[in-house]
């Protein structure tokens, strides 16, 4: 159900927005690559600048 998916993503976004950049990068470094890509695309989709793009690029390599 798309609405449930959207609500789930939104709650993820809200919790991400409250995290510090260091905390977020540490969390991402423990994620599977698929989850990292999913998280990155969620942030892009909702066009929230949660962390600087450079930080993303370095953590994604």
Image (cartoon, helix red, strand yellow):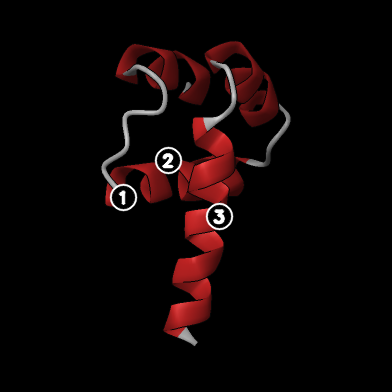
Identify which residue is drawn at 60% across, 12% down: 22
The kind of secondary structure element at disc 1 is loop
In the image, taking residue 12 as reference, residue 53 lies left or right, namely: left
Q: Which mark is residue 11?
A: 3
Mark nearest the camera among 1 and 2 is 1
Q: Position of residue 2 (x, y in %)?
A: 43, 82
Mark 3 touching mark 1, by CB under 8 A? no
Q: Is residue 55 above or below residue 29?
A: above
In the image, taking residue 37 as reference, residue 33 lies left or right, namely: right
In this rendered view, identify the residue nearer to me: 45 or 57: 45
Q: How many marks?
A: 3
In this rendered view, identify the residue nearer to me: 25 or 6: 6
Residue 50, image quadrant: top left
Mark 2 touching mark 3, by CB under 8 A? no
Question: Sequence order check: which comes first, mark 2 or mark 3?
Answer: 3
- Give the Cα separation between the discs numbered 2 and 3: 15 Å
- Give the Cα separation between the discs numbered 1 and 2: 10 Å
Q: Where is residue 58 in the image (x, y as percent from the top left)?
A: 45, 13
Question: Sequence order check: which comes first, mark 1 or mark 2?
Answer: 2
The kind of secondary structure element at disc 2 is helix
In this rendered view, identify the residue nearer to me: 3 or 35: 3
How crowded pointer 1 is (Cα within 10 Å; few <14, some 14-19, many 20+) is rated as few
Q: In this view, does 47 lie above or below 17?
A: below
In the image, taking residue 47 as reference, residue 39 lies left or right, namely: right
How crowded pointer 2 is (Cα within 10 Å; few <14, some 14-19, many 20+) is rated as some
Q: Where is residue 42 in the image (x, y as percent from the top left)?
A: 41, 50
Task: Give the residue pinned by disc 1.
Answer: 46
Q: In this view, does 5 lie above or below 15?
A: below
Task: Give the residue pinned by disc 2.
Answer: 40
Identify which residue is drawn at 53% across, 16% down: 21
The kind of secondary structure element at disc 3 is helix
In this rendered view, identify the residue nearer to me: 4 or 40: 4
């Amino acid at each position: 159900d798309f609405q449930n998916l959207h609500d789930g993503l939104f709650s993820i976004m809200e919790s991400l927005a409250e995290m510090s950049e260091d905390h977020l990068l540490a969390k991402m470094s423990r994620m599977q690559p698929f989850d990292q890509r999913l998280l990155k695309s969620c942030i892009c989709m909702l066009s929230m600048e949660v962390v600087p793009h450079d930080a993303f690029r370095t953590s994604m390599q």
